[in-house]
Image (cartoon, rainbow, N blue to C red):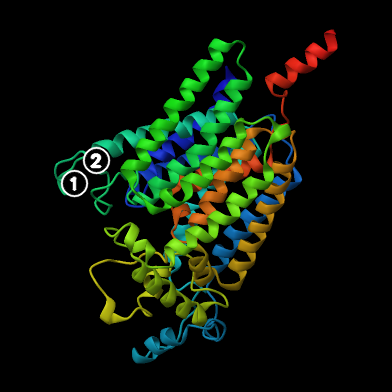
Amino acid sequence: MRQVLRSAVVPVYILLCIILGGSGQGIWGVAALQFLAILIIGWSLLARNRLPLTRSAKILFVIAGATILLLVVQMIPLPPAAWTAIPGRGHVVEGFELLGLSPPWQPISLTPYDTAATILTLIPPLAVLVAMLVAGAYRASWIAIALLAGTFAAVLLGALQVASADPLQSPWYLYRWTNYGVASGFFANSNHMAMLLLVSVPLLFALIAELRSQSKNPRSGSAVMLLAVAGILVLLVGIFLNRSLAVLLLVVPIVIISATLLMPHRIRLRGPVIAVALVSIPAIMAAYLTPLYDRLLVSNVTSFESRQMMWSDTVSAIQDHGLLGSGAGSFPRVYRQYEDYADVTRTFINHAHNDYLEVTLEAGVPGVLLLLAFLLWWGSRAVPIWRTAAVDRYAVAATVASAAMLVHSLVDYPLRTATLSVIMAACLALMARPRPREGTELEDLWLTTRHATV
């Protein structure tokens, strides 16, 4: 019983994050998730029978620790002679001069309180990493079930949202600032709901493959396939209701790649899968970086022109702050100094809609180096996971789901939500500590048994 409760910690927490962590507007829900995350970290570090860390897990924790350390360093006050020499601080010095004040001690971050708040957002994904890699408080199949349960509930909520006669007055939208008229589920941003749908696809295929391999007779196998069809239909309904370009562009390659999880390892078509993945990335960028985006979704607020403008202004800000960064969480305040006032509308720009540009602006060269280290780690794990037939399907599904979020980060900010950040952390943990397969495909086992009895 104790082991069952232990294995349920991460799946239950992920389900709670799906329900409560869809937007920073839900202050109390996010605060509750952060408080629970602190408890989970403390329990995991004090729990008995802690797991030995693998080399890849150690590297992942080093990267995570270095990221938190970087944000802490950004908040340390520096003497005037030091911080005034940092690029991009000229206007701050001018402000003190206009007030007739001498420059005081100031941190690297232009918005230290926002940087502190950003550190708090890292606690939930860190808790998932620690609970999975240190305490082993999960079962991969339970994580998949929790993710799918939360996603199906979000689809149901999305159906209620779009069925409302007047979306602006609908009680089914959970946040004041949201994408009215489309299915956003537990999120404020419909694109984030789209990403939840996408990352559920490979985990669904992995779960179905696992259940099918454990089927004892044709009847149970048929029930598993019926369950698979039902799950896929629910996800397709969610995709139809969501109407996000991210889903429309990514769903086909993700489904094709995820479907290989149902194949025996001996005949898995790695070449075509890699080709589909490589072709999908430039196709997605071509759609987002050209007016084709507006033609596909003319009702979307964040159009091609607005994205182009945001990225251009962000690059201008990076040129001034790119050495040490402007501080985590400072993007909204810094961006205002670079946008063309003639283009200012009632729409408030709070993110660059490109997490890589935003990280570069806020964290500077140190942040870029940490980002490159993470991407190298991810690649070093994804390649052997796909090459080795002994690795379980959940690790393969984790590479697909995490890759989808990394690609989507080129044109949006999915990992800024507690929901998707903890799912990303779970995927990374599955990649860092993949299970050795307990057996082979049923048909392979049957063939081996028949050969042994002849």
Q: Residues within 10 Å of mark 2 (few under 14, many from 20)?
A: many
> What amino acid does circle 2 point to?
Gln
Coordinates of residue 273 in the picture (x, y in percent): 62, 46
Q: Residue at x 54, y 38 (%)?
A: 202
Residue 185 seen: no
Q: Residue at x 62, y 18 (%)?
A: 214
User: Label 1's element?
Assistant: helix
The image shows residue 49, relative to residue 364, as above or below, that is above
Residue 161 got which mark?
2
Q: Residue at x 58, y 32 (%)?
A: 206
**Residue designated by label 1:** 167
Using the image as rendered, state which of residue 388 and residue 350 is in the foreground.
388
CB contact under 8 Å: marks 2 and 1: yes
Coordinates of residue 260 in the picture (x, y in percent): 61, 36
Coordinates of residue 333 in the picture (x, y in percent): 37, 72
> What amino acid does circle 1 point to?
Pro
User: Label 2's element?
Assistant: helix
Residue 167 seen: yes
Quarter of the figure that contains the N terminus: top right
Q: Residue at x 66, y 50 (%)?
A: 60
The image shows residue 286, relative to residue 47, as above or below, that is below
Coordinates of residue 386 in the picture (x, y in percent): 69, 42
Quarter of the figure that contains the C terminus: top right
Q: Residues within 10 Å of mark 1 (few under 14, many from 20)?
A: some
Residue 182 got which mark?
none
Q: CA distance from mark 2 to mark 1?
A: 7 Å
